[in-house]
Amino acid sequence: MKKGIAVILATGLAFGSALPAGASTNDLNPEQKQALKKMEIVKQNWEDERKVPSFLSGKLSEKSVKTEKAVKSYLKSNESLFKIKTKDLKLVNEMTDELGMKHYEYVQTVKGVEIEGARFIVHTDENGEVVAVNGDLHPDAEKNFKGSSKVSVKKEVAIKKAWNHIDVKPQNVVSDEQSFMKKSDVSDMVEKSEKVVYEKDNEYYLTYKVQLQFIDPYPANWQIYVDARDGSIVDAYNAVTEGATTGYGYGVLGDYKSLNTYYSNGTHYLYDVTKPMNGVIETRTANYGSSLPGYYSVDSNNAFTATSQGADVDAHYYAGTVYDYYKNTHNRNSFDNNGATIRSTVHYGSSYNNAFWNGSQMVYGDGDGSTFDPLSGAQDVVAHEITHAVTERTAGLQYQNQSGALNESMSDVFGYFVEPGDFLLGEDVYTPNRSGDALRSLSNPDAYGQPSHMDDYYYTSSDNGGVHTNSGIPNKAAYLTIQSIGKAKAEKIYYRALSIYLTPTSNFSTARAALLQATSDLYGTGTTYNAVASAWNQVGVN
Ligand code: L5Q
Ligand code: ZN
Ligand code: CA
């Protein structure tokens, strides 16, 4: 186990007694002090416990050292400084860099077996002068060696002990539908085993280092050190790198955005674990088919920059901003207010000109390129869809006739609250070849074929009784409300009505009453109350 490292920064003679407390060369033995005198040390770090250098730089050699043989004799002449036998150092790498410096990398061995991680590197400049040495020296390795040249445990037994230790059966791996990974496949499992000396608490164990790498039942790259004397486990850890990351990409409209992603086993996922949810925000792709929820949206380098990834990027990013809106503005944790996973699937079908909440998740078409661009490219459309989920878990407004039109209106109105700035819905993705238009308008529903007054209520049996048409009436009331009392009050009132007063069968008249009740709860029965009442009067709902 590595302890703190004493650091001494010396600039030649200047320090004297000014060394920091606890970082003293007083601990060194006389031979080490003698050896240091022959060097001009610029920087030195010492390993606290073992009293060996972990980093020395400066002018460290008297003669030039230009071959591996010369390095060996340099190490030999400094054995008392490094406190290890040169014969125990095995060259593992020799490299000349672009500055002409040479780097000789050794590994320390005990009885011919490498000590795990015990590298020591000698660096020479272009003249062959040793200018630095650094690494991890183990002077007590031989003295504290736990093992013998005679190994009693066979390699196959050590591997079995390793599998037992982690309680995974190599031949019986469960497949996990929720796993990111491929279905279990025994050939996905890799077993490696080699003999190493493993240091733990200054004891040096002869071990089998068994590496067990697999994907199911969980991503693993186990490093298990099995005592070669009796098969006991000296140490074990899972070295898989996995977790929350930040990637980036371009949205449908080509805009750059940062993304909360997840890295696992070499793959980056649109999978956001950063929110205080029980679940996550995850984004998938139907790959132009219609089966749901589809495949995880992934990328090999966390750069979701391909044009085809724009829909994925925006669905993921905007789901996050809508989550934040409900959390920050209404203290609502996801659509169920219990941190449920927000799942989106993009690239649904072929040229599909719509988006929807299916009772479990959001689904986005790519549009046909003429009526729509990929629909997740509009923040207000994403807010519209997530609000359907909120409505389902609150008021539960039945999706037909007036309650259905109110349901639609709530989605449009929260589309505005999430993305204020205009009273249009879907303008960012609607008719990409025509500017200035949108799917709907809260301020002027009539511009898109919707009524804005009860006198023009549209009776039809299609579209569940005209839910996308008659929503114009409550939409206009919301617009008038926002215009007179402002967004901040309006969104409080609408959320309170939605989550406390509205019921599955509410109609326009009872919605007016619900909103007025929410208003008086929050702001009393003064001007704000009168403004809400007036808004509904103006659309003919009294
Ligand atoms: C609609 C959701 C959105 N779809 N309007 C029919 O008329 C029909 C569907 C919609 F993604 F486009 F916003 O609002
Ligand atoms: Zn809708
Ligand atoms: Ca808009």
Image: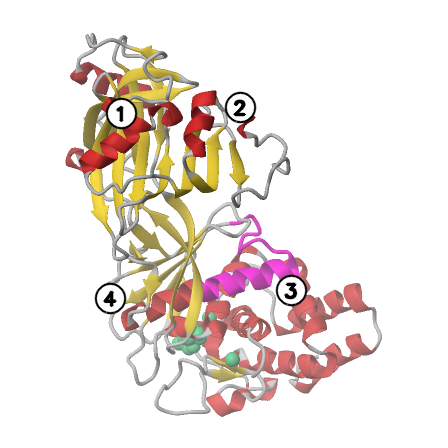
Give yes or no for contact between labels 3 and 2 (Cβ–Cβ under 8 Å).
Answer: no
User: In the image, is residue 255 above or below residue 346?
Assistant: below
User: In the image, is residue 507 above or below residue 171?
Assistant: below
Disc ID at residue 495: 3
Under circle 1, the secondary element is: helix
What residue sits right under mark 1 in the picture? 86
The total of numbered circles placed on residues is 4
Give yes or no for contact between labels 2 and 1 (Cβ–Cβ under 8 Å).
Answer: no
Mark 2 vs mark 4, CA separation in Å: 70 Å
User: Which amino acid, by three-letter code, is at mark 4?
Assistant: Tyr
Q: Nearer the observer, disc 3 or disc 2?
A: 2
What residue sits right under mark 4 in the picture? 288
Under circle 4, the secondary element is: loop
Counting other residues with Cα less than 10 Å from the Cα at mark 4, is it few (<14), some (14-19), or many (20 or more)?
some
Counting other residues with Cα less than 10 Å from the Cα at mark 1, is it few (<14), some (14-19), or many (20 or more)?
some
Q: How is the image coloured?
A: secondary structure
Disc ID at residue 27: 2
Decide which of tag 3 and tag 2 comes sooner along the chain. 2
Q: Quadrant of residue 68?
A: top left
Q: Nearer the observer, disc 2 or disc 4?
A: 2
User: Which amino acid, by three-letter code, is at mark 3?
Assistant: Tyr
79 left or right of 322 in image: left
Counting other residues with Cα less than 10 Å from the Cα at mark 3, is it few (<14), some (14-19), or many (20 or more)?
many
